[in-house]
Image (tube, rainbow, N blue to C red):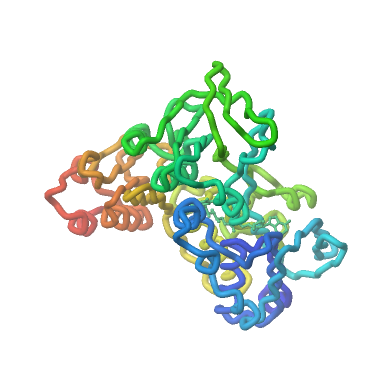
């Protein structure tokens, strides 16, 4: 399929990845039809502030939007909000939306994101028990998110801890229940997790680690969480932050290969050459990690997917991938992450955790693979550049804070 054959692009999912695709296609000179379909009622918006300034009330819905709502019409992008796609006919190259209307495509982009996992417990449907994925979820929480309210957060991942931080700053009484023995178990090292555990504890967050929720208590409204060991934690609000599942329903129904997400090649193309998949719903080989297939849940990954697909559809030079990156804001701590730490065999700490400004560098076989930088933007940027260019700084050198990061990066090999 070459560029001239593509007259209609349909994008399913009007989130970060879908909106980026539409924007990049137009900016790259695509003059055909673009239909961007999203089941949420709002135009595409950013999710990261949901657990930060939107939850605290410091950011309005208008400021959450990725681009002003009027831009889509100006750029001749047909944005259909509050509309769900229910079927893909690969042979006929059409999608069907709820209500039966069908839309043809030459190229189809699946940018369907992920669904938050629900607590599979009795009482999980009580009023006051919430998921945390959409602006509507946060809007439902906010009226009860008041000083003195008792909040139980189930799950100590980044979203759970960000919610806990905002809640403490807003005067709520906060308890975090985590089934693992430490917070952030899936996403960072025990050292960095320990730092965040100490910070939250100092701010007054209580933790139940290794705790197994067994029941959500209440009649109409939640009143508490009972753990498997019989402990009862009173609650006015329960927020589940126990991870997501990639939204692959449509892809499954039309028999596209699914692994941990919809499987694609480096160009984000699925097994069907006319269908791409990007963002939280998809898994693709990561250039900077020996083409290991990865499904990442980050703004960077969603944006990059949109750019890769736009370049593939436009037939322009392939987009050059960056090293993966992510961030998290908790209290006055800005954590910036570059790379994928999972396979590390050595750690090097630059700076002191007690200064609340440090960077943890992760190595595999002596080569730098990732960094967690807390209030250290220079270390984050330096490490990101190194990972991208395949260079490294020996662990024994990186710990020397008397040498500026810039100098170390310049000398890296
Ligand atoms: P989404 O943004 O989820 O968009 C997918 C859209 O597709 C959804 O609106 C969904 O309703 C729609 N959809 C699904 N199926 C259909 C269908 N059949 N028909 C029509 N529409 C459909 N990342 C960071 O890098 N840093 C952060 O600090 C950070 N904080 C976060 C905080 C929160 C609370 C959350 C929830 C996420 C955060 N993330 C963060 C992750 C980041 O926001 C996501 O990785 C990113 O939004 C993924 O974009 P996406 O387009 O793949 O999916």
Front-lying residue, 43 or 290: 43
Identified at 79% across, 52% down, the residue is: 254
Q: Is residue 204 left or right of residue 102?
A: left
Would you identify the image quadrant in which residue 313 lies?
bottom right
The residue positioned 64% from the left and 65% from the top of the image is 42
Q: Is residue 367 left or right of residue 267?
A: left
Q: Residue furthest top?
A: 229
| Vertical order, 128 against 55 (above or below) | above
Residue sticking out furthest to the left: 402
Residue sitting nearer the eye, 103 or 308:
103
Seen as rendered, the residue at the extreme right is 100
Residue 282 in view: no
Q: Looking at the rendering, in which quadrant would you find the N terminus?
A: bottom right
Q: Quadrant of residue 125?
A: top right
Task: Tell me: residue 84, above or below residue 23.
Answer: above
Q: Position of residue 385 (x, y in %)?
A: 33, 58
**Rendered location of residue 113, percent (x, y):** 62, 53
Viewer-proximal residue among 75 and 341: 75
Query: How many marks overall?
Result: 0
Answer left or right for 186 relative to 12: left
Q: Quadrant of residue 81?
A: bottom right
Task: Give the answer, above or below, for where 353 lies relative to 377.
Answer: above
User: Residue shown at 87%/63% (left/top)?
Assistant: 100
């Amino acid at each position: 399929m070459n560029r001239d054959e593509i007259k209609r692009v349909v994008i399913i999912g009007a989130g970060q990845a879908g909106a980026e695709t539409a924007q990049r296609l137009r900016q790259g000179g695509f003059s055909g039809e673009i239909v961007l379909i999203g089941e949420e009622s709002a135009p595409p918006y950013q999710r990261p502030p949901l657990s930060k300034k939107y939850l605290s009330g410091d950011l309005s819905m208008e400021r959450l939007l990725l681009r002003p709502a009027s831009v889509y019409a100006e750029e001749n992008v047909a944005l259909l909000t509050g509309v769900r796609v229910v079927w893909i006919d690969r042979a006929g190259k059409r999608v069907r939306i709820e209500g039966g209307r069908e839309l043809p495509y030459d190229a189809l982009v699946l940018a369907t994101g992920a669904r938050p996992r629900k607590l599979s417990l009795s009482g999980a449907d009580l009023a006051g028990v919430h998921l945390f994925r959409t602006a509507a979820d946060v809007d439902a929480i906010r009226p009860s998110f008041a000083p003195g309210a008792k909040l139980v957060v189930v799950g100590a991942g980044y979203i759970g801890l960000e919610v806990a931080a905002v809640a403490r700053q807003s005067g709520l009484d906060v308890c975090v229940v985590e089934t693992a023995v430490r917070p952030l178990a899936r996403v960072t090292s025990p050292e960095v997790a320990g730092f965040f555990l100490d910070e939250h504890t100092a701010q007054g967050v209580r933790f139940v680690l290794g705790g197994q929720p067994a029941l959500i208590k209440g009649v109409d409204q939640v009143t508490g969480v009972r753990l498997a060991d019989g402990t009862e934690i009173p609650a006015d609000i329960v927020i589940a932050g126990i991870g997501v599942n990639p939204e692959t329903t449509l892809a499954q129904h039309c028999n596209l290969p699914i692994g941990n997400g919809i499987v694609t090649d480096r160009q984000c193309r699925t097994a069907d050459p006319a269908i791409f998949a990007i963002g939280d719903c998809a898994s693709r080989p990561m250039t900077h990690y020996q083409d290991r297939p990865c499904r990442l849940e980050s703004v960077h990954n969603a944006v990059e997917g949109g750019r890769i697909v736009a370049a593939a559809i436009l037939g322009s030079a392939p987009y050059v991938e960056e090293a993966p990156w992510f961030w998290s804001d908790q209290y006055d701590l800005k954590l910036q992450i570059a790379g994928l730490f999972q396979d590390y065999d050595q750690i090097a700490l630059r700076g002191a955790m007690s200064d609340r400004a440090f960077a943890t560098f992760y190595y595999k076989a002596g080569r730098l693979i990732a960094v967690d930088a807390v209030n250290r933007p220079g270390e984050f940027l330096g490490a990101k550049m190194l990972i991208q260019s395949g260079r490294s700084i020996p662990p024994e050198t990186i710990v020397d804070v008397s040498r500026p990061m810039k100098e170390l990066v310049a000398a890296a090999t």
